[in-house]
Image: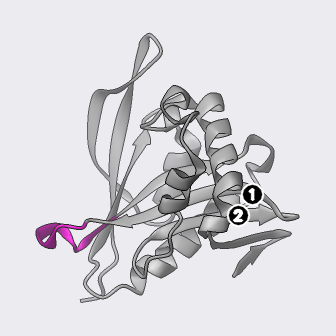
Amino acid sequence: MTTVSPVQVRRLVPADALAFQALRLSGLQAHPEAFGSSYAEEKDWPVERVREWLMVRPDAGVFGAFENERLVGVVGLGRQARANFAHVGFLWGMYVHTDAVGRGVGRALLDAALALARSQPGLRHLTLQVNADNRAALALYQSFGFVEIGREPDAMRVGNGFCDDIRMYLPIATH
């Protein structure tokens, strides 16, 4: 477990599904521009579907940051399943609850996800997509060495507007 102040970071398991779903739905409502999904799409998902996301796999998983046993932040690490792309990992679903922002929660979550990624044989790099207007997230990712490799104008529709996405890349292979 990684500890930052009173925050503990660990891999989430299916038993964390209700807390994960509640935090994710809160994020989808508060910051719809930060997610590829929407509150309307996920609000009626059965908890069993969420539990499947939280199944512990050796090379992928969801990390949660807890403050006094309350889930305050999450990030997912995935890996491409197809053989020709299995060397690529990706971060998804990064969200820190508003009342926990600015206390190192995002950094602790990324530390944990990157530690797992770096331990995976054959994983050469990570990618992520982030809203181009999310300066705090961009700065955090850049502080870990992620670099911008592309920008997609109007990548996502949010309400009646559109947001650009920035795609980022981090090499992790040591050879």
- The question of residue 82 being in magenta is answered with yes
Q: Which residue is drawn at 34% across and 77% down?
A: 172
According to the picture, the residue beneath numbered tag 1 turns out to be 71
Q: Residue 45 carries which label?
A: none
Q: Earlier in the sequence, mark 2 or mark 1?
A: 2
Q: Are marks 2 and 1 in contact (CB under 8 Å)?
A: yes
Considering depth in this image, is 74 or 146 the residue closer to the camera? 74
Q: Which residue is drawn at 84% across and 65% down?
A: 69
Indicate left or right for 66 with 136 as reference: right
Q: Residue at x 74, y 51 (%)?
A: 102
Residue 175 at what x, y percent from top left?
A: 23, 89
**The residue stretch that appears in magenta:** 81-89
Residue 161 at what x, y percent from top left?
A: 43, 14
According to the picture, the residue beneath numbered tag 2 turns out to be 65
Amino acid type assigned to the residue bearing label 2 in the image: Ala
Local SS, label 2: strand
Q: Residue at x 66, y 30 (%)?
A: 30
Indicate left or right for 50 with 152 as reference: right
